[in-house]
């Protein structure tokens, strides 16, 4: 029976890849960040602030000057209710309507999700 420990298999793959790149470019150390954290979304307020945080993240990290125009974000897809696999209407309904969705995104309140971004 094959080994179904996918985590271990990916670890081997990433370790081999890292060693190859480190040897090729005469570098040392890890290429990848530490494993991601999974945190239960256990309240409506937390979910609302989490959506806001995710959409502001590219601007916070300097990838864009305007999070709402960042082409790799779901913000415009949701706001303009474009056809996609994203349940945009469900998100809009969560905020009440498109206007409320946009208005909420005008604010950034990281205190509601501080435990998520301590290492950010």
Image (cartoon, rainbow, N blue to C red):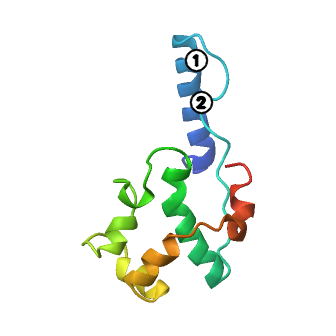
Q: Is residue 70 above or below residue 30?
A: below
The residue lying toward the viewer, choosing from 22 and 62, is 62
Residue 101 visible in the current orientation: yes
The residue located at (62%, 84%) in the rendering is 44
Please tell me which residue lies in front, 104 or 34.
104
SS for dot 1: helix
Q: Is residue 7 above or below residue 109?
A: above
Q: Which of 36 and 105 is in front in this view?
A: 105
Pointer 1 residue: 22
Which residue: 53% across, 55% down?
57
Mark 1, Cα crowd under 10 Å, few <14 / some 14-19 / many 20+, is some
Residue extending farthest left: 83
Vertical placement of residue 48 versus 28, above or below: below
> Spatial distance from mark 1 to mark 2, Cα to Cα?
9 Å
The residue nearer to you, when weighing 37 against 60, is 60
x, y (%) of residue 18? 57, 25
Q: How far across and down, in percent of the image, does residue 32 sit?
A: 60, 36
Query: Are the two marked residues, 1 and 2, in contact with CB atoms closer than 8 angstroms?
Result: yes
The residue pinned by badge 2 equals 31
């Amino acid at each position: 029976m094959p080994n179904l420990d996918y985590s271990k298999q990916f670890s081997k793959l990433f370790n081999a890849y890292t060693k190859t790149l480190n040897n090729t470019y005469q570098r040392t150390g890890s290429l990848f960040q530490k494993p991601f954290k999974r945190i239960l979304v256990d309240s409506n307020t937390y979910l609302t602030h989490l959506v806001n945080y995710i959409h502001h993240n590219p601007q916070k990290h300097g990838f864009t000057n305007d999070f709402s125009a960042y082409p790799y974000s779901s913000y415009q897809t949701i706001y303009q209710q474009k056809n996609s696999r994203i349940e945009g209407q469900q998100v809009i309904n969560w905020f009440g309507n498109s206007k409320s969705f946009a208005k909420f995104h005008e604010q950034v309140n990281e205190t509601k999700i501080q435990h998520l971004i301590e290492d950010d």
